[in-house]
Amino acid sequence: MKPNRFDNIVNRVIGAGVVIGSCFLIGLMLLMVTNIIIRLFGVTIQGAYEMSELIVVVPVAFGLGYTALYKGHVVVNIVVSRFSPLVRKIVQSFTLIVGAGIWAVVFWASVEIIPKKIQLGEQTEVLGFPYLPFRLAWVIGLALLCLVLLFNLFQLLRRGEEK
């Protein structure tokens, strides 16, 4: 199947998310290693645990879409592999629709809660850092995941038309 313009856009957006997530993961690694090393001298980085909790959101959020795009999730085909190609395609379509629907609900709930959290001025205990940027990264990651699931559905349905 020849990639079209939309395929390239999805791949580039997910690729950018992976780069961003990887940068945050490297930052998390450096934070943890630095904190471990300086503990040898009796010093710690204040708020390192809080920062770790926040930083890990970004690679996880962007990793969801990447994993879905490259079909890296665990798949059990014991039963489905015995079905005919048409039934298998129907089952795959159904699971993609249900998955996109569930993640769309999580996305919507995450979007709905943001204004309330902004109004409360939600921030971390020790550093007083706002949660908002990380909530936004989570919402963007969920939106990308929903987009990829729908993209995978579109590709699955398109595959049948070419034969």
Image: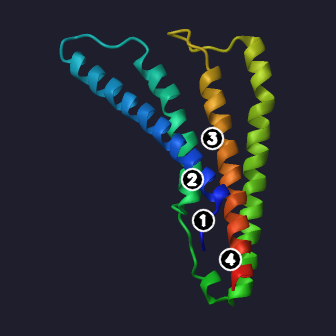
Of the residues tagged 1 and 4, which is closer to the observer? Answer: 1
Q: Name the residue under label 2.
A: 11
Q: Can residue 28 be seen in this view?
A: yes
| Few, some or many residues within 10 Å of mark 2 (<14, 14–19, 20+) | some
Q: Where residue 28 sits in the image (x, y, percent)? A: 39, 29
Query: Mark 4 belongs to which amino acid?
Result: Arg
Q: Which residue sits at x=38%, y=28%?
A: 27
Which of labels 1 and 3 is toward the front?
Answer: 1
Mark found first going from the N terminus, 2 or 3: 2
Label 2, secondary structure: give it.
helix
Closer to the N terminus: mark 1 or mark 4?
Answer: 1
Q: Mark 4 points at which residue?
A: 159
The first of marks 1 and 3 along the sequence is 1
- What residue is shown with label 3? 141
Along the viewing direction, whichever of 50 and 96 lies nearer the viewer = 96
| Among numbered discs 1 and 2, the one appearing first in the sequence | 1
- The residue sitting at the left extreme is 41
Q: x, y (%) of residue 66?
A: 54, 52
